[in-house]
Amino acid sequence: FWYSHHLFVFYFLITLLHGAGGWNPNFWKYFLVPGLMYILERIMRYCRGRRHVILKSAMTMEPNLLSIAMDKKSAFGEPGFNEGQYVFVNCPSVKPYEWHPFTI
């Protein structure tokens, strides 16, 4: 999933090299807006991922079901949350760069 959604890197590389002499002088027109949006999203994700959350409880309910209770203020901040949304949870002591989606 992750790899297929990051194929845009090859798209921009091909766009960059597709032109006279192997260089596209109009590349910046295709890269400016989506490139800035991607960079800003990655910065926001990094900053939000650095937030520490107070864990109230964690238990296994069934063999494939995990229940996690967190402090609302530390986990979701002031705007709060709505049912059906999801969060990415990371346990740095297990794998620091592996995030898992959990439904709220």
Image (tube, rainbow, N blue to C red):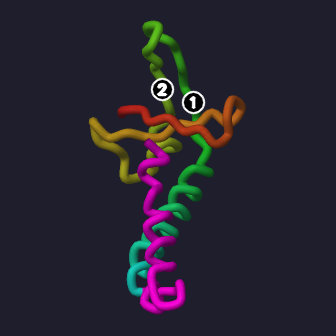
| Residue 62 or residue 52, whichever sits in front | 62
| Residue 85 or residue 76, whichever sits in front | 85
Sort mark 2 into few (<14), some (14-19) or many (20+) by Cα contacts within 10 Å. few
Sort mark 1 into few (<14), some (14-19) or many (20+) by Cα contacts within 10 Å. few
Image location of residue 87, percent across then percent down = 43, 40
Q: Main secondary structure of the magenta part?
A: helix
* Mark 2, residue position: 69
Assess whether residue 12 is covered by the magenta stretch: yes
Report the residue at 54% width, 39% height from top.
99
Report the residue at 42% width, 52% height from top.
5
What stretch of residues is rendered in magenta?
A: 1-28
User: 42 above or below 89?
Assistant: below
Q: Which mark is residue 68?
A: none
Among numbered discs 1 and 2, the one appearing first in the sequence: 1
* Mark 1, residue position: 55
Q: Is residue 7 left or right of residue 90?
A: left
Image location of residue 12, percent across then percent down = 46, 71
Image location of residue 18, percent across then percent down = 45, 80
Residue projecting furthest to the left: 83
What amino acid does circle 2 point to?
Answer: Ala
Q: Secondary structure at mark 1?
A: strand
Image quarter of residue 104: top left
